[in-house]
Image (cartoon, rainbow, N blue to C red):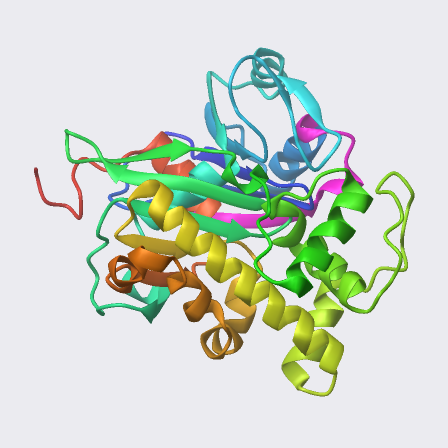
């Protein structure tokens, strides 16, 4: 019997690993473990720790990493981990190592979601995933990818670094946030606002905390989980204002992504948004999504959904190892 393969979703905060059996129609993830990246010197050490826990020596692996996955030398964006592709494969005893961008993997995972693994925000209900699909996701960073069906009928992902484009402020409060982020980081990108730390920094800007330079440690920023909890409890006006502004900016970015990609579906992934879907529905997200002038009516027809599958990145990495033969099991 063939040994299971290793899959991983390596972000700035956590490294997720799982095993997947070969030959399955839809990959089944097992022995999922979440390892905090701060506890390891690098990816090799984290992967070794996981493989020791599960007592498996895989021959194949697909690892999704939070950075561009081209070339042999890889350096993560939001974690000081760097490695060489060939050296890592040799160190882990792998015959085959596939590397892909972490959000590209999440986007590929979207193509294989079961109906219960996403929640519809707007548009016609039903299992069909109309392409092109813009996949965006705030987490430790901000991911953006494009999902399309290729000529053979299989899903293909176009990986992008769209989260690093410039943040466009649309009113006075957002201009204040933009200036705060620019002072702190030197440049205000979408990712600076739409990520976990971005929630903390929006809160700091709205509560008039001085924006010290990013190189200066600032443990006094309010943790994003605390802000989210306080906002959802309804007892903290500053926290609710922060989350409301986060949702409004996300709506603008989602609409922009749909226009950039010519999308018929927008899928919101990442670890943050599934925690507050009811709040998102009642926020200015939809208004800002449609606020595109002459193209508002065009965007009315775009389906918007939130991915609720707990590990779309691991699912996408598994699909990279074991791609399905046909879309939805049906030959093209």
| Image-based side of 40 in relation to 56, left or right | right
| Image-based side of 180 in relation to 160, left or right | right
Q: Which quadrant of the view contains residue 324?
A: top left
Image coords of residue 156 (percent x, y): 29, 34
Residue 60 highlighted magenta (yes or no): no
What residue range appears in magenta? 28-44
Image coords of residue 169 (percent x, y): 60, 54
Number of disc labels: 0
Quadrant of the rendering where the N terminus is positioned: top left
| Image-based side of 16 in relation to 155, left or right | right
Residue 43 highlighted magenta (yes or no): yes
Q: Please give the name of the residue rendered at 56% of the width and 57% of the height, measured from the top-left corner.
A: 271
Q: Please give the name of the residue rendered at 81% of the width and 45% of the height, measured from the top-left corner.
A: 184
Image coords of residue 312 (percent x, y): 44, 49
Quadrant of the rendering where the C terminus is positioned: top left
Can residue 199 be spotted in the picture?
Answer: yes
């Amino acid at each position: 019997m063939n040994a299971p393969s290793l899959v991983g979703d390596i972000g700035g905060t956590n490294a997720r690993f799982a095993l997947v059996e070969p030959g399955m129609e839809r990959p089944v993830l097992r022995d999922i473990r979440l390892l905090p990246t701060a506890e390891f010197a690098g990816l090799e050490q984290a992967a070794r720790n996981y493989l020791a826990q599960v007592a498996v020596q895989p021959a194949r692996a697909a690892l999704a990493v939070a950075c561009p996955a081209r070339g042999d030398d890889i350096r993560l964006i939001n974690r000081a981990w760097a490695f060489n592709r060939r050296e890592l494969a040799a160190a882990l005893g792998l015959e085959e190592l596939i590397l892909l961008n972490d959000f590209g993997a999440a986007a590929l995972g979207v193509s294989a979601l079961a109906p219960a693994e996403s929640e519809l925000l707007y548009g016609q209900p039903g299992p069909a995933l109309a392409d092109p699909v813009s996949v965006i996701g705030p987490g430790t960073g901000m991911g953006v990818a494009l999902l399309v069906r290729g000529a053979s009928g299989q899903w293909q992902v176009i990986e992008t670094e769209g989260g690093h484009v410039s943040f466009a402020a649309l009113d006075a409060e957002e201009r204040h946030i933009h200036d705060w982020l620019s002072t702190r980081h030197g440049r205000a990108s979408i990712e600076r606002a739409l990520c976990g730390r971005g929630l903390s920094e929006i809160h700091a800007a709205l509560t008039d905390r001085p924006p010290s330079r990013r190189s200066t440690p600032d443990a006094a920023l309010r943790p994003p989980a605390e802000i989210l909890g306080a906002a959802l409890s309804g007892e903290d006006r500053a926290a609710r204002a922060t989350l409301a502004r986060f949702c409004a900016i996300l709506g603008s970015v989602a609409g922009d992504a749909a226009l950039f990609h010519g999308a018929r579906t927008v899928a919101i992934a990442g670890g943050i948004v599934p925690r507050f879907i009811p709040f998102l529905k009642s926020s200015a997200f939809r208004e800002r999504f449609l606020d595109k002038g002459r193209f508002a009516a065009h965007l009315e027809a775009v389906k918007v959904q939130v991915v609720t599958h707990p590990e779309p990145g691991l699912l996408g990495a598994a699909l990279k190892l074991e791609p399905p033969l046909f879309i939805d099991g049906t030959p093209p």
